[in-house]
Every structure is written in C-alpha cells, then in structure tokens.
Amino acid sequence: MNVLMGCSKVIGGQLFLVMAVVAIGVTIAQITVGQNRSFDRSPETRVQEIIKRLDANSDLRYLLLRGDRGNGPHMPWMDQMKDLGIQQASFKISFTVVNNKRDFHIVSVRYLSHYYRSDKELKSRNFMRKVKLLNLDEALSSAILKRADEILLQLINSKQVKENLGPIRCGIIYANLLDDEILPIIDLPTDVNSNCSESGLK
C-alpha cells in the first residue's frame, strides 16, 4: 500500500511537471508569434494588402503607389497597436527651446482605427482601459517624444528655417506613429514660434 502511494506521488509529480512545461511552451510560443506577426508576410505583400484597404484618395495610398516606404525598425508596441485595432496614434506636442535645452510636453493623443482618418477615433472607456493595462500609452509616449526631438533638431539645423523664422523658441509638433514599420509617416507641418508667451517665453 505504501509502495503504491509512493509511485502515485512520483507519477503525479511527473505529470504536473509535464503539464507545467507544456503550459510554459505554449506561452512562449504565443509571445513569439505576437512579436513576429509583421514578419509572417513579406513587406511588399503587406504593402499591397494595405493599399487595397485604403480609400482611392488616400495620401498614404498615393505615397505607397509611388514607392515610398518606411525605414524604421519593428517595435513591440506595433504589435500591441495591432492587437487593439490601432493603426495610427496621432500626437500634438508642445516644445520650448531655452539655452539649447529642448523641452517637450504631450498635449494630446488620438488613437485611430484607420490610417489618417480623424473620424475613426477609438476612445471608449473599455478601449482606454486596455491601453493602460498594456502600458501602451507609456510605450507610445516614449517613442513619440524621441521622434519629436528628431523633428525639432532637423528644424533647428535647417538653414531655410533660420533665414525665414530666426532662432526657434517654441511651437507645436504634430507627429504620428503607425502600426507597421514598412509605412511612410505623414506629419503635419510643425507650428514654430507661435504663442511663445503661453509657454512662458517672452
């Protein structure tokens, strides 16, 4: 009787171990699939699929047909955007430049279910809760502030901007993040040196 009970414990322990290993394997597989989702199809295949879904008068469609492509790396937050049905995150960012120090503040962000369609905003309470739970808002904020700094540096170093506007002191950057690195990003022009007094600059 004692021998049988001992064997039962060993067998039960082995069964539990096998089930745990299987569960871990499934979890890892799911994560891997999520991280590599954009690489299941070739970049050009993805582009052609996107073109078919875009409106005939879409600026993005025009750029893709012309041959324009994005050149950034694939980021984990792109997969999270896809999971939540977000194709575009559109940001409004204020900035100031004082003694060569660049400061940024995210004024607003809009999550869109269609590329460059402001009428397709996702903003339900349940949706925003999911964005928070995934910490997607933090990941996108970090990514867009990096983009904003790159955009501002290009303006600061632009000879044309210096000649026409003088030193850059403040403004608003309108910048976007998309759910696929193959796509070119279309940003509205940066609003430079307007309403500097509202930013605390004289």
Image (tube, rainbow, N blue to C red):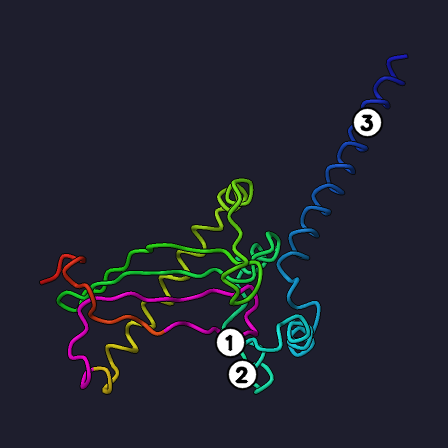
Q: Which residues are magenta?
A: 162-188
Instruction: Say which quarter of the image contains residue 8.
Output: top right
Residue holding disc 2:
68
- Residue that appears at 55% across and 60% down: 78
Identify which amino acid the numbered label 1 is placed on. Pro
Q: Nearer the viewer, residue 47 or 146?
A: 47
- Residue that appears at 62% across and 59% down: 35
Mark 3 crowd level (few <14, some 14–19, many ≥20, 10 Å Cα): few
State the CA–CA distance, disc 2 to disc 1.
6 Å
Left or right, residue 114 beside residue 168: right
| Dot label at residue 184 | 1
Looking at the image, residue 132 lies above or below residue 200: above
Looking at the image, residue 133 lies above or below residue 75: above
Instruction: Say which quarter of the image contains residue 165.
Output: bottom left
Q: Secondary structure at mark 1?
A: loop
Is residue 185 highlighted in magenta? Answer: yes
Pick whichever of labels 2 and 3 is earlier in the sequence: 3
Q: Secondary structure at mark 3?
A: helix
Residue 21 in percent (x, y) is at 73, 41
Identify which amino acid the numbered label 2 is placed on. Asp
Residue 109 in percent (x, y) is at 41, 55
Q: Secondary structure at mark 2?
A: loop
Residue 11 in percent (x, y) is at 84, 28
